[in-house]
Amino acid sequence: MKKFNRIAIVGVGLIGGSLGLAIKKNKIAKKVVGICRRKVSLKAAVKSGACDIVTLNYKKGLKGADFVIIATPVGRIVNIAKKVIKHVKSNVILTDVGSTKEIIVNRIEKIVPSHVKFVGSHPMAGSEKSGVKFAQHDLFKDSVCIVTKSKKTNKKALNTVKKFWKTIGTTSKVLSPANHDRYISFVSHLPHVAAIALTVAAESGSLEYASTGFRDTTRIASSDPLLWQDIFMTNRKSIIKSISKYKKILREIEISIKGKNKKFLRSILKKSKDIRDRLE
Amino acid sequence: MKKFNRIAIVGVGLIGGSLGLAIKKNKIAKKVVGICRRKVSLKAAVKSGACDIVTLNYKKGLKGADFVIIATPVGRIVNIAKKVIKHVKSNVILTDVGSTKEIIVNRIEKIVPSHVKFVGSHPMAGSEKSGVKFAQHDLFKDSVCIVTKSKKTNKKALNTVKKFWKTIGTTSKVLSPANHDRYISFVSHLPHVAAIALTVAAESGSLEYASTGFRDTTRIASSDPLLWQDIFMTNRKSIIKSISKYKKILREIEISIKGKNKKFLRSILKKSKDIRDRLE
């Protein structure tokens, strides 16, 4: 893809840091600038080698940037977008990496001036770890990145954002913000709820017998609580719907175990295996 | 440990096959005999190298065995024990590898003659894969094996069974059959129910966006449906209790998302992270 002059990343944590490393590895920009909130993160960002320049100053960090990525936790993205748009040049492309999209995209589209081209992104990569020290240049390799398209999305900017994600190794797919939130509630937000509830449900005496099954099923429960509080708060409608569907299925399994309904159990176990096997 | 003369394994699948390989690797028996149900499994068992002798014939397979392991799916263990006890010599030690224990141990203890020393086992290792072709000599390494102790358990046999599991790499822990079933419902059976329900709940359109989080959380849903139908049917009481507790926690999360109760969400996310982090 055409090389950017300067890419600015706001928030240099696991995702922002990995983006910096991937951009440098794939030579997508002449310079990568990291914008941090605190001095301590600034030092870690410098040490990671993910950025050529690291600063606490938005004006300085955004000067000359032609592509800006907001890589902070979901709950701060909109406020940061407000700050970013004050300092960017005309025709800059702005994206974010938030795990929920309808609220974020709607709110940013409302405040963004016409000379800033905003396109929402959600790279479906990451880990239960957080912090730039876990950043990897290949974090996004072979993953899916959802890029959102709304009525207000600029088509040229959408294509550039898609190309950007493709160049660092993801398969980019386009969804409306609402469809993003609906689908992702089933494959990410509901599994998160399920994993939390499993760890909290487990009697303390039982945990010493936890094997690979429990560990895998609950791995994501180790994720950052604040990040997930915000994800839950910004996709409430879809998550409530998916929990409701989930509880209905649990109830069916419960009833069939109570009623010794082997036929139903075998059928749902088989259905579930078929679905899961197809993902491999 | 003192070497066995002849160990017979009934059922040479993933677990039975891995046991054979581990026994041979650790030189715990002069001979390992595999007893299979069907000719086709017999061929696969021979090919795996897990047994010195493989047979379809119980009488022949059990002749001279001083240690017998029933490594079939849960639903067949009791009936196989009935067949095994007809052909074994005095003072043979018999164990099984079933994932539920109270029903299995109670039923076998009722039929076992005094010259056969039965001790229940549950090695907490395995995989969503099944079949001897996936057998590995180190499947049990660094895992936990629960050995059950009831009023009828012979202490000397219990120690021998514990030593056996230790020799092939597990940490063996002793629990009553009832406590086994209670604890394991939380760390294995409930997670299984949760994983199945997650795959079935997911809207079909959402699955193409499934990332590592969904894959890990639902990995165990690929397990053998018949095996799990039997596990559910033989630990009904504890599984129903754990599903009920799980649903209560889900309801709390659901209510707090509906009511925008950030404080509760943050607190349960933090609690869950603390529990999960301690497992690492």
Image: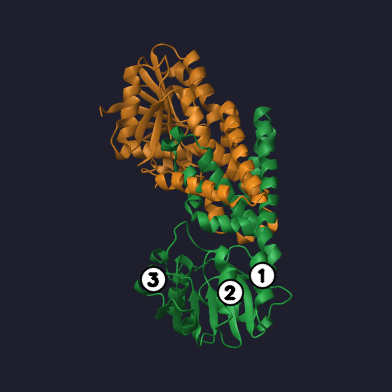
Chain colours: A orange, B green
Label 3 marks a residue whose chain is B
For the point 52% across and 77% down, the residue is B167
The answer to whether residue A220 is seen in the rendering is no
Q: Earlier in the sequence, mark 1 or mark 3?
A: 3
Percent from the top left, x then y, of residue B180? 66, 63
The amino acid beneath tag 2 is Ala
Task: Verify CB contact (< 8 Å) between mark 2 and mark 1.
Answer: yes
Above or below B122: residue A82 = above
Q: Residue at label 2?
A: B81
Tag 2 and tag 1 share a subunit: yes
Q: Residue A28: percent from the left, percent from the top?
A: 29, 32
Which kind of residue does numbered mark 3 sit on? Lys
Q: CA distance from mark 2 to mark 1?
A: 10 Å
Q: Chain of mark 2?
A: B
Depth check, front residue: B201 or A128 = B201
Q: Amino acid at mark 1?
A: Arg
Image label count: 3
Can residue B98 be seen in the rendering of this structure?
yes
Which residue shows up at 32% across the image and 24% down it?
A160
Residue B189, picture quadrant: bottom right
Q: Looking at the picture, do discs 2 and 3 lie on one chain?
A: yes
Q: Secondary structure at mark 2?
A: helix
- The furthest residue to the top: A114
Question: The C terminus of chain B lies in which quarter of the figure?
Answer: bottom right
Instruction: List the residue tagged with mark 1.
Output: B107
Residue A266 is left or right of residue B100, and the answer is: left
Placement of B253 over or under B226, stated as above or below: above
Q: CA distance from mark 1 to mark 3?
A: 29 Å
Q: Which residue is mark 3?
A: B39
